[in-house]
Image (cartoon, helix red, strand yellow):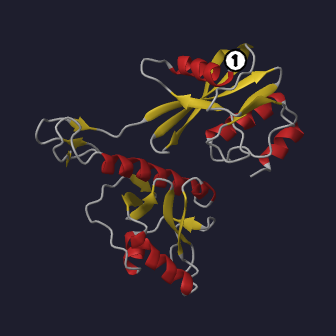
Amino acid sequence: MLIAVFSDNKSVLLRRHGASGSARIHHTRYHIPSVDELSTEGVQIPTDLWEFAVRGEDVVGGVFLERARLDHMLARTRLRGDSAAFEIVGRRQAADLLDIDDYWAMNRAFHLANWDRNTRFCGACATPMERLSGEIAKTCPSCGGHSYPQISPAVIMAVVHDGKLLMAHSPRHPANLYSVLAGFVEAGETLEHAVSREVFEESGVLVRNITYFSSQPWPFPSSLMIAFTSEYAGGDLTPEEGEIDDIGWYAPNQLPDEIPSTYSVARRLIEWFVSEYGTGDDLQHLLERS
């Protein structure tokens, strides 16, 4: 069994390929450790974990362990110069370190492990919850209530006007990172309504021709990103105070220096825009960026 170990909501424990003898994946630098690898290093994993995902012939579980339980093992493997040392890395950074199937399995394990630890007690009567047999769900032995993993839908959209893409910087982003607009779907909304509302709230712009593009699990901590393309329909750019601190229209050959990573659906929307409105050279330049 492989175990995705999380020290907090943003980090995961991975192991570099090397002395572990793992031959599952050769072309990536890191992998999700196994129970045996962790046990060898003195990290004891609960024996009653759910099997949250499948990775090839392996099943994948997920667990939260306090950083203090991992620090000694991390220091020991570093000191002995182990070529297969364990490291704690950011879950977003892990997209560049893991095979895509490992990354998918790790993020699914996080989403479900986070749900598991947040639903220990019934939300109606506070009785400790019990697992339902045969599915990832819980039931309350007192009132009979059920709990299933929660998914928070969010929309993310490319807005195009005169061959330029609407991109913005949010105070929540790293200092120089610009991306397309996004936001959570509210109760009672259609996805298209959410696109229109979020774009107008954050930019003051109206949109039309809203078209589904793609989707992506986004467990930060429990979202599903649903991507759309759209066209400018009117309005003047007016960034939403507290949400957007800079916004503008960007041509395919004038994108900001820092944009979302290649794993994200935000990046795929940007690549779509450049492929549709830019030149072959513009697209090649973008695809060569990290």
Residue 45 % position (x, y): 33, 68
Residue at 48% across / 31% down in the picture?
153
Q: Look at the image and tell me whether residue 20 can be seen.
A: no
Q: Look at the image and tell me whether residue 51 can be seen.
A: yes
Residue at 73% across / 13% down in the picture?
235
Give 112 or 36, whichever is nearer the viewer: 112
Give the quarter of the image for residue 46. bottom left
Q: Residues within 10 Å of mark 1 (few under 14, many from 20)?
A: many
Residue annotated with mark 1: 205
Question: Is 35 drawn above or below residue 155 in the view shown?
Answer: below
Give the quarter of the image for residue 284. top right
Question: Is 86 drawn above or below residue 130 in the view shown?
Answer: below
Q: Is mark 1 on a helix, strand or loop?
A: loop
Q: In this view, does 115 lie to the left or right of 212?
A: left
Question: Is 260 drawn above or below residue 213 in the view shown?
Answer: below
Give 52 or 194, whichever is nearer the viewer: 194
Q: Is residue 53 left or right of residue 118?
A: right
Q: Residue furthest front?
A: 241
Residue 160 % position (x, y): 75, 23
Residue at 45% across / 41% down in the picture?
222
The residue type indicated by label 1 comes to: Val
Residue 220 % position (x, y): 50, 45
Residue 34 % position (x, y): 42, 69
Give 140 or 247, whichever is nearer the viewer: 247
Give 27 or 122, whichever is nearer the viewer: 122
